[in-house]
């Protein structure tokens, strides 16, 4: 942010990319710990337990905020194609990163490729079936595409995980 305010936007983008890479490594470690815990307890856990476990974890919220800040700054400072190439690079390194898959899905939505976005959200739910953002996005896309039956199923799934969710 400091480099950006002095007009050195290239240095700022490099700083955001380094920070993003560090944040992704930390988030990936925490996600792997979560997956390991979920696998160990999968016979005893319901979707609501997965949702609670997904949201827990010391420091994860701060990492998610930092990740969002970096990603937003990079999205604004790069061309759409450069941003997509960066996401692809990171996804090669972290193929099960839920936050990267969400960003890729959102990118496809902005670029008018809802089928590809749905593929990303499905990949996320194969990793963790309780990711509310992915279910919400799928429901919205199904509804926009006129697939009301799938949209209703998505909204029901969303409601079973997060009864307080206003989208459901």
Image (cartoon, rainbow, N blue to C red):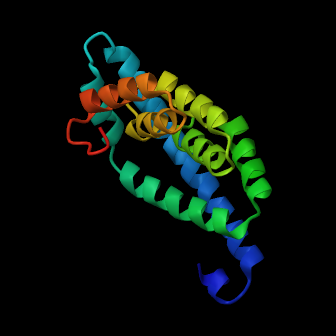
Q: In the image shown, does 143 or 81 lie closer to the viewer?
A: 143
Q: In the image shown, does 120 or 70 lie closer to the viewer?
A: 120
Q: In the image shown, does 55 or 120 lie closer to the viewer?
A: 120
Residue 33: x and y in percent read: 43, 31
Residue 160: x and y in percent read: 25, 27
The mark tally for this picture is 0
- The residue that appears at 53% across and 44% down in the rendered structure is 99
- The residue that appears at 40% across and 57% down in the rendered structure is 62
- The residue that appears at 59% across and 59% down in the rendered structure is 71
Residue 79: x and y in percent read: 77, 63
Q: Is residue 56 above or below residue 74?
A: above
Q: Is residue 6 left or right of residue 125?
A: right
Q: Is residue 31 left or right of residue 116?
A: left
Give the quadrant of the C terminus.
top left
Quadrant location of residue 123? top right
Q: Is residue 160 visible?
A: yes
Residue 69: x and y in percent read: 52, 64
User: Which residue, as the protein is rendered here, is positioned at the far front?
Assistant: 146
Give the quadrant of the N terminus.
bottom right
Q: Is residue 44 left or right of residue 71?
A: left
């Amino acid at each position: 942010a400091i480099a950006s305010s002095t007009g050195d936007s290239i240095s700022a983008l490099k700083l955001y990319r380094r920070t993003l890479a560090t944040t992704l490594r930390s988030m990936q470690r925490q996600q792997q710990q979560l997956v390991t815990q979920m696998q160990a307890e999968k016979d005893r856990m319901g979707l609501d337990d997965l949702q609670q476990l997904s949201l827990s974890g010391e420091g994860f919220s701060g990492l998610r905020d930092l990740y969002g800040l970096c990603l937003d700054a990079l999205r604004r400072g790069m061309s759409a194609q450069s941003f997509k190439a960066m996401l692809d690079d990171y996804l090669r390194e972290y193929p099960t990163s839920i936050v990267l898959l969400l960003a890729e899905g959102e990118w496809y939505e902005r670029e008018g490729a809802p089928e590809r976005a749905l593929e990303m959200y499905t990949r996320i739910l194969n990793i963790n079936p309780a990711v509310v953002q992915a279910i919400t996005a799928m429901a919205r896309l199904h509804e926009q595409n006129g697939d009301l039956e799938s949209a209703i199923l998505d909204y029901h799934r969303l409601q079973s995980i997060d009864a307080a969710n206003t989208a459901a």
